[in-house]
Image: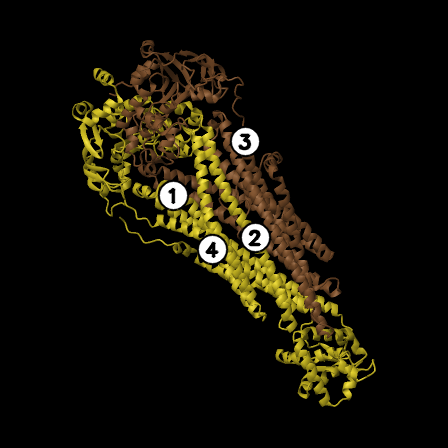
Amino acid sequence: MTNTKHNPKPMMRGPMGRGHGMRGAGEKAKDFKGTMKQLLRYIKPYSLSMVFGILFAAVATVMTVVGPKILGKATTELAVGLSAKAMGTGGINFGRIAEILIFLLCLFGLSALFHYFQNWLMASVAQKVSYNLRKALAEKIDRLPFKYFDTHSHGDLLSRATNDVDTVSQTLNQSLANIITALVQLFGFTIVMLSISWEMTLMAFCVLPLSAILVMQIVKRSQRFFARQQEALGAVNGHIEEMYSGHIVMKAFNGEERSIAEFSENNQRLYDSAWKSQFLSGMMQPLTTLIGNLGYVGVCILGGWLAIRGAIEIGDIQAFIAYVRNFNQPINQLSQSMNVLQSTAAAAERVFEFLNEEEEVAETTTPAPVRDRHGKSLIQGQVTFENVHFGYNPDKIIINDFSMFINAGKRVAIVGPTGAGKTTIVKLLMRFYELNGGTIYVDGQDIRNYKRSDLRSLFGMVLQDAWLFDGTVMENLRYGRLDATDQEVIAAARAAHVDHFIRTLDHGYQTMIDEDSGNISQGQKQLLTIARAFLADPKILILDEATSSVDTRTEVLIQKGMETLMKGRTSFIIAHRLSTIRDADLILVMKDGDIVEAGTHDSLMADNGFYASLYNSQFEDCE
Amino acid sequence: MVRIKKVRITQYLKPFALSIAAVIVLLFAQAQCELALPDYMADIVDVGIQSGGIRSAVPEVIRKSEAEKLAMFLNDEQQQLFLSSYTLVDAGQASAKQIKQAPLVEQEPVYFLNSLTDEARASLNSMLARAEMIVVSLPGLKNSEEFKELNLPEDVDLFSLLRQLPQEVIDDIVARIDASLEVAGENASPVASAQFIKMEYRAIGINTDSIQLNYIFSSGLRMLGIALFGTICAIIVTFLASRIAAGVSRNLRLAVFSKVENFSSAEFNQFSTGTLITRTTNDVQQIQQVLVMFMRIVVYAPIIGVGAIIKVLNTNASMTWIIALVVVVIMAIMGVAFAVVMPKFSIIQKLLDKMNSVLREFLDGLPVIRAFNTQGYEEKKFDQVNTDVTKTNLFVNRTLALLMPMMMLVMNCVGILIVWVGGHQINLGTLQVGDMMAFIQYSMQIIMAFLMITMVSIMLPRAVVSIKRVLEVLNCPLSIADPQQPKSFDPQQHGYVEFKDVAFRYPGAEENVLENISFLARPGQTTAFIGSTGSGKSTIVNLVPRFFDVTAGSIEVDGVDIREVSQQELRHKIGYVPQKGVLFSGTIESNLRYADADADWHQLKQAAEIAQASEFINAKPEGYDAPIAQGGTNVSGGQKQRLSIARALVRNPEIYIFDDSFSALDFKTDAALRKALNELCQRTGSTVLLVAQRISSIMHADQIVVLDKGRIAGIGTHDELMKTCEVYQEIAYSQLSKEELDHDEHEA
């Protein structure tokens, strides 16, 4: 609910409305019906509230619809009384008028009450449904395979969880009730108008389609300009973003004039489409008002004629004017709501599209245990790859038939140029991705025979781009094992040589880490993740060595920490430092996603292959 | 610091002054039209329907007999005026035209109205109105108690009876009727006299229905004309307002953008890139939207509001207090609602931000979360903020649920109240029915105007904030500007960069980041900078292209202080490669040509070759025409860096600056690139300034400047520094093992 514009129906229409198509310019769902069906499933638990909401809306509207007719009666009473008085045959019957007015007061009061109940119910349903949708989205994230996140940006998902759910909620809150109200009004107005005079109703109905056609024409035209405006705005904003973020480069290459020239051109295009779309959508209101006035004049003329004939009363004209003036309202409301419904369906579709994504392969029903009854680990940490085939995309297998046996407690270094896919092995080990062929065993057991959570609990990760969340240092460390005591956390920090550093922070273990953790350097973050891994006490380690942006002193600490951590554990190290690589028990050399060589440093150097050239390049002379 | 004239927002409205004036005039016209409509409706009801379309008490034709009846209730002077205003036409003497106008003239004498001045007509009108009213109400007298006491026969002709009475008695009767009519109010008189005239016309054989219809029709058409005119005004206003708003925002956007393009890094850091983007995009857009609203609502609402109030005051109905009351009530309701809800809005915004960040964290940390099996913990965290958002939203929406029904109730009550109070005034004769109906419509217009103003006043503060933010940018003084009389570089020197006791402090910072920096970089040589994070090595090289100005000391390029030449000329000498590869949307070629639009193909290809980029460029099906997405998101980090190196090479500058530009490259590419680069610089005699993290990248530089906490800890070659500089040794040992360093020495 970022912009809770509670659209007060009659008065906010027109100039306050931003015009049609501002949002997403005519966005449409691919499968309107299917999406709505799914949405209904979420609404179903609240169907009682919904039914009552709709009922109340209808009742409240019926009451307001008959209002003007009854008020007209009071006017008629006045006019009749006045005439009688002029003729000397009587006077104004105030008792009768008071009766009418008090009845009306009660009617309007009740209508307001029902209207309020309806709003209250709808707001509740809308919020509860969006709560459930967001909850479902969050839970869905858990069950999705990593493959999904390779092809979908986080921003996209976030926008589904916030903007799209918000759109759905707004619609439930507003448009649904609006549609009901508008429909009841439409029918109510027609019936009451007919009851007053069919001739006048007929005339009003001749005018109204004019309004509808005009509105539709303008919407069609303005939508084109809105799209053009959106496009120009995109170009302008894109250019601004690009130039501002590349400011230094732009300046370094004297690009000011070129940049401003390009901007001016886009800016002018934006101006052209902006005023046109604004003008067209702004024209809607005066034009519909004109047509409303057309009906108004028509009612006055025809009503006058009928009144002379005595076919209708003066109060009826007053009432009829009120109806004709307001008749546009439900029509506009409906056409607007239809647009809103379309974009809502599009938003809901995006939400459901995500909720319907294929989930991770189901867990095994007979999981192999990783701990005994006392919680002691049963796993040694021995890893075997057997004829492993894998590709992020099944059409493009990047690891072909890889087999390797790694004994418990050994160190494996994964090396290769940037972008060679060094983290792929790690992701496969933790079953973030499913294999296309072959098997990976941990302690002789196919990893698919473990529960995912059990399997993953065997691993500890220390990544270069360390992941910490908003919270205190203590909370972040405890993430390694949620039930650890403060003492255990501190002990782990000590083991990781990070205790001293934490104590130098302004609030020690209670120091808050912000969103980008700007108060802690990249290297220090990695130190914290080492401590976290200590706390988790995993059997198998996955380490990612820092390449850059770590100052020398921290680097020394990180190395010491990692060294201690690796003792007695099987470790996979994504290595950049030659010393680490040379000390490894096994080196996996990767290139373009595939494992091209495997062996010890000496054996690989002797082979004089890719590894050897990689290694030597480091020391090639620049001269 | 360059002083600039303070920019105001009005400055941007000035070019549109004429249009704005036109808008205001047109809005007045539109308001007049809008306000005239209920008046016409009142006329249609009061005159057209109630009075049968008969506007005045002066009949066009009247039978002699009836004229005599009226004359009875006029004094001598009045009788004279009355009779002289008409021409009597006897039966059978009438012209064809007169017969057509009054068919009865063929049978009996009829008075025809002469053409009169407006004045005469007005005085005639008021006296006849009274007389007609008496004549109409006389039959009613038959029913009165007093009359019955006279015991006259039922079918007696009152007028012949009256005629027999002496004048004094008639005067007495008239006075008494007057008195009783006084109570009924003069209001009844138009209806009564219309009644009289209508009956008279009918008797004369005139089609009264067509008179009524004609009246209704002509009023209706005039109404339509006015409505049309009002609409035309409104459309022109929309047209002008759209152009003004879009025009102002176009000019504003260009001004902000041009200004920002001339910002130095100091101003950029002061604002941060993010807010500068939103200030140029969203804030300006916001101003545009508010401008339209301002012209169409904020200006219009008071015009129509005040106009309606004047109209209401003119209807001589003393019901203005109702409108005042309603306005106060509505404002109070809105005030309370927004006082309760507004603070919650900002809370919701914060909660949404929090929800977003929780979810973002969840997504970013997904591998870690899965590795640690803490999904439940994360879901609980999300559920907490999800619940908070829902709760607050529920509160706000349920509160707002009250708002609309209450407003509607108040509006409806206004109608009821007006009918009740107005009814009594109609009874007293101070108001007509149609006027009362018009009153209801005027009050709605007034209330609407107030509502609009309230609504807009809620949105205005946001626009004011936007305007402030935009003006802040426009009024920000530039810290780096070209000198008044720029000097030229010494044409004898090419690529000498000398720091003379330079100190630098970031604007607003408390301490210097750099102090006592002095060194000389020579053409054909590589000067490298190394040091731990925050040692100031990047800052040094960013001072050379004057992204910042030094705080103390000076930097000379080719013998001239860089503050004394134009920025263009200075930067033309430099090939700069930033820390993060920054590419612009376009193609690979357009990015390379960014350095030099006139570069030939050979230059581009050679640059790509040296930057180790040609391999991947050629691997792309489109080659050099391969598209680059905005922000270069469609190429990898390493490729971006190589392309931005190639871009600098295309320029073929005297001075190269590499600000930690090899960090995303793997060992092999890094080495190959450095080798090719070295060869090039040897050949062209370019000066290289190079910042690096990895010691292996700079080991072979001609001169290494070691930085520690903003000061120079040592200058020299690798071998010299390994012997003399402790900081350098520390860095070296942390990155390379002893063996590697030894190994290197063996190789060398």
Q: Tell me which amino acid carries mark 2.
A: Met
Viewer-nearest of discs 2 and 1? 2
Q: Which chain is brown?
A: A
Residue B388, horizontal then vertical, whole percent: 48, 40
Residue at left 48%, top 47%? A272
Q: Which residue is mark 4?
A: B457
For marks 1 and 4 on the same chain, the one whose residue lies earlier in the sequence: 1
For marks 4 and 2 on the same chain, the one whose residue lies earlier in the sequence: 2
Real-space CA distance between mark 3 and mark 1, rounded to the nearest whole angstrom: 34 Å
Real-space CA distance between mark 2 and mark 1, rounded to the nearest whole angstrom: 37 Å
Image vertical order of residue B569 relative to residue A325, above or below: above
Q: Which residue is mark 2?
A: B404
Q: Tell me which amino acid carries mark 1.
A: Thr
Q: Which residue is mark 1?
A: B275
Chain of the residue on which disc 4 is drawn: B
Viewer-nearest of discs 3 and 2? 2
Name the residue nearer the viewer: B577 or B600. B577
Same chain? Circles 2 and 1: yes
Q: Secondary structure at mark 4?
A: helix
B151 left or right of B278?
A: right
Real-space CA distance between mark 1 and mark 4, rounded to the nearest whole angstrom: 25 Å
The image quadrant of residue B581 is top left
Q: Quadrant of the C terminus of chain A?
A: top left
For marks 2 and 1 on the same chain, the one whose residue lies earlier in the sequence: 1
Same chain? Circles 4 and 3: no
Viewer-nearest of discs 4 and 3? 3
Chain of the residue on which disc 3 is drawn: A
Q: Which residue is mark 3?
A: A355
Q: Tell me which amino acid carries mark 3.
A: Leu
Q: Colour of chain B?
A: yellow
Same chain? Circles 3 and 2: no
- Disc 1 crowd, CA 10 A, few/some/many (<14, 14-19, 20+): some
